Image (tube, rainbow, N blue to C red):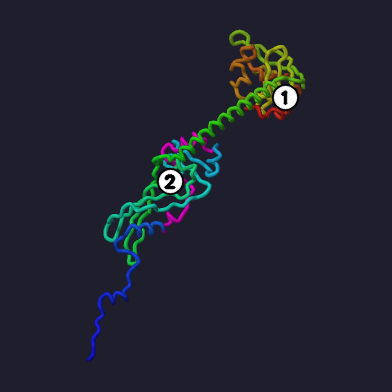
């Protein structure tokens, strides 16, 4: 008698093939799919500050803080000139960082065969010294579509930074206190160095104003103000020293620190339409209003001279010689003291 063997359903299942993905998108599936996208396989060296993060970063020394300088290249604060710029309010790191999907926070239907996926993400290996000041993560969303071979990202993933300052840990508080004290010490040391440098500069200014030798003597005419609207031209004895151009007998010195380099110019002039040829030498003055150059803005007129730096000669040779000697003395002065001229 022959027997008929009937295969049961469990036995048939041994010969079936089930897909590795679920038609109903799961959170582990969504996380794995997002992690393979370019957004999460790339690295980033530009990280935004949290709210008021730049101000705190700057208060702790910013680029002057050696601990910060180890991990960043440049900071781009937010200003009225770069609103809307992707680089605004960011810090550029020396070492690019990857980002990761931390968790899927929700999956919802977004149409037939479509799912909207919400998630949280974060940057990996953010330097500890920067964590209190920068956004280290945020939220994101993506749309996925079901294909015959599984789920694929249709749109996104789009990331948003969480710029809410994080609650500081005990270790971070200790770190910030240490950075703050280091910045106070740096500012104190910088102030001492600045005071010392300024004292040295002022001492050198005093030295540079003190003549030690006369290099050249000549006579020149300049104008006196006489009464209201009237003037007369008087000849003065003038010395070129290693510190200044000095009018003998008058408290007027044109210090070389106030003479603009290469602006001693000579111009032949028809003297006020008189038909008399004069040669006008102008000594260009820097920084009008600087105390080293003028005691007040009207020092020369108050002393009776209209323009002490406008010299007038009767012949070209005298003008040429004065020009050459003033320029020569000025260049020699600059060779010694150019560092003190603002």
Which one is nearer the viewer's eye here, 85 or 66?
66
Q: Residue at x 71, y 28 (%)?
A: 336
x, y percent for residue 187: 55, 30
Q: Quadrant of residue 245?
A: top right
Which one is nearer the viewer's eye here, 50 or 155?
50
Image quarter of the C terminus = top right
x, y percent for residue 232: 66, 11
Residue 326, labelled with which disc?
Answer: 1
Say few, some or many: other residues with alpha carbon within 10 Å of mark 1 (under 14 / 14 to 19 / 20 or more): many
Which one is nearer the viewer's eye here, 32 or 182?
182
Instruction: Give the magenta-colored segment's residue range.
Output: 36-63
Q: Residue at x 61, y 12 (%)?
A: 302
Which residue is situated farthest in the front direction here? Answer: 1
Which one is nearer the viewer's eye here, 94 or 272?
94
Q: Quadrant of residue 27?
A: bottom left
Q: Are marks 2 and 1 in contact (CB under 8 Å)?
A: no
Residue 47 belongs to the span the image colors magenta: yes
Q: Say which residue label 2 marks.
A: 136
Say few, some or many: other residues with alpha carbon within 10 Å of mark 2 (under 14 / 14 to 19 / 20 or more): many
Depicted 149 relative to depicted 322: above or below: below
Element under disc 1:
helix
């Amino acid at each position: 008698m022959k027997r008929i063997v009937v295969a049961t359903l469990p036995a048939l299942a041994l010969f079936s093939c089930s897909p590795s993905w679920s038609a109903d998108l799961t959170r582990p599936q969504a996380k794995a799919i997002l992690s393979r996208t370019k957004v999460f396989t790339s690295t980033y060296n530009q990280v935004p500050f949290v709210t008021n993060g730049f101000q705190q970063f700057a208060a702790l020394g910013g680029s002057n803080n050696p601990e910060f300088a180890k991990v960043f290249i440049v900071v781009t604060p937010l200003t009225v000139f770069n609103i809307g710029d992707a680089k605004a309010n960011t810090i550029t790191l020396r070492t690019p960082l990857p980002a990761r999907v931390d968790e899927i926070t929700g999956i919802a239907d977004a149409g037939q065969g479509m799912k909207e996926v919400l998630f949280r993400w974060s940057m990996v290996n953010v330097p500890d010294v920067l964590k209190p000041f920068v956004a280290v993560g945020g939220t994101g969303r993506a749309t996925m579509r079901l294909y015959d071979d599984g789920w694929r990202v249709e749109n996104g993933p789009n990331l948003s930074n969480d710029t809410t300052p994080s609650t500081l840990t005990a270790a971070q508080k200790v770190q910030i206190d240490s950075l703050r004290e280091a910045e106070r010490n740096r500012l104190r040391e910088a102030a001492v160095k600045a005071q010392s440098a300024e004292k040295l500069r002022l001492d050198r200014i005093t030295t540079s104003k003190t003549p030690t030798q006369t290099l050249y003597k000549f006579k020149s005419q300049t104008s006196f103000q006489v009464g209201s609207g009237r003037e007369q031209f008087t000849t003065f004895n003038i010395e070129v020293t290693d510190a200044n151009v000095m009018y003998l007998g008058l408290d007027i010195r044109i210090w070389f620190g106030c003479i603009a380099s290469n602006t001693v110019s000579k111009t032949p002039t028809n003297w006020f339409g008189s038909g008399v040829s004069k040669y006008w030498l102008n000594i260009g003055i820097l920084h009008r209003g600087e105390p080293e150059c003028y005691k007040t803005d009207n020092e020369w007129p108050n002393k009776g001279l209209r323009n002490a730096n406008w010299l007038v000669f009767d012949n070209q040779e005298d003008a040429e010689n004065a020009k050459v000697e003033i320029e020569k003395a000025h260049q020699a002065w600059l060779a010694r003291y150019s560092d003190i001229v603002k």
